[in-house]
Amino acid sequence: MTQGTVSNLAQRRRDDQLYYPVDDEISLIDIWNVLVKRKIMVLAVLLLSLLGAGIAVIVMTPVYESRAVLQIGQVGQVGQTGQPVTQIEAPAVVVKRLIEQDKGTGNEFLDKKTSSSIKTASVEKDGNLITVVAQASTPAAAQGYLTQVVNKLLREHQRLLDYAQNEKRQYLNLLQLRSYDFTQAIQTLDKNLRALAAKDIALEIILAQEKAKLFEQRGQLEQKQLELRMAMSELQSKPTALIKAPTLPVDPVKPRPAFYLALAAMLGVMLGVFGAFFMEFLGRARATPPSSGGQGA
């Protein structure tokens, strides 16, 4: 075979490799072999991740949550058809006020040692229920802090309800006095009518008309008194009530050891596998000799 023929065969072989490259796809067996070969590294990374998560769980300050549910009270109104009652304080305003007071520097219940605070305050679907959640570093601190906040709100709403009820009570007393005056005036007119005894028909007619007006006005006063008593009744006026007392938490919401360890295990396996393939790549790169350049004829 001549030298030209050998050169042509070599050139054709290089062309075949250029246009039809060798299949470099890695099989599952190759992946498994790499993992088995680098198993110590994968296990080491996994153990380090679990160890770090365990230390974090131990070092982190636990957080406990206490939960309470409040029903906003209502005050009965007089003479408002279609809206017989009104809330002592709008639930949205209560929620905002609780959060703002908790963040304020003048918070009388703030305890820096237990890191007590209001986490959330939200209005439920029916509109007059409020759920308040407090956090602290101990179960007793979380429950105690929320109890103080809730009791303060209950006292404030009771004071507002007492003020509204007192105003209605004074108005009711005034209506009763006016009704008594109308009754006395009617009795006086009755005496005058009997004294006339048909002596002065014109004056008797005037007095009878006045008596009818007094009867009408007294009826209106009695209707207002009835509305006031209804507004002051328990059907329309209710204080803010504690539907669910602040709970005593058993388990902390933070940290969650099971979640942290599971997350650390997943990340540890991922990092270990990545490290194994990276080390395998470096090992093969060092073992492969550099390709020699072409030599001149």
Image (cartoon, rainbow, N blue to C red):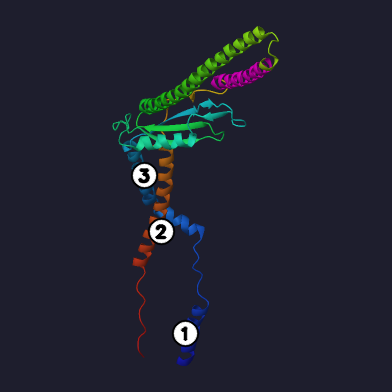
Q: Furthest residue to the front?
A: 199
Q: Earlier in the sequence, mark 1 or mark 3?
A: 1
Which amino acid does the dot numbered 1 rest on? Ala
Q: Earlier in the sequence, mark 3 or mark 2?
A: 3
Task: Identify which residue is drawn at 51% across, 16% down.
Answer: 173
Task: Identify which residue is drawn at 32% across, 39% down.
Answer: 55
Q: Position of residue 210 (x, y in %)?
A: 63, 19
For mark 2, give the secondary structure: helix
Image quarter (top left, top right, bottom left or bottom right) of the C terminus: bottom left
Q: Position of residue 243 (x, y in %)?
A: 50, 24
Camera-nearest label, 1 or 3: 3
For marks 1 and 3, give the CA distance: 53 Å
Camera-nearest label, 1 or 2: 2
Q: Is residue 182 above or below residue 26?
A: above
Q: Which SS does the magenta portion mostly show? A: helix
Q: Is residue 79 left or right of residue 292?
A: right
* Residue 178 is inside the magenta segment: no
Q: Which residue is mark 1?
A: 10
Disc 1 vs disc 3: Cβ atoms closer than 8 Å?
no
Which amino acid does the dot numbered 3 rest on? Leu
Q: Position of residue 54 (x, y in %)?
A: 35, 39
Q: Which residues are magenta?
A: 204-233
Q: Which residue is mark 2?
A: 277
Q: Is residue 129 above or below residue 50?
A: above
- Few, some or many C-alpha atoms within 10 Å of disc 2 (few <14, some 14-19, many ≥20)? some
- Few, some or many C-alpha atoms within 10 Å of disc 3 (few <14, some 14-19, many ≥20)? some
Q: Furthest residue to the left?
A: 113
Q: Position of residue 223 (x, y in %)?
A: 61, 21
Q: Which residue is mark 3?
A: 47
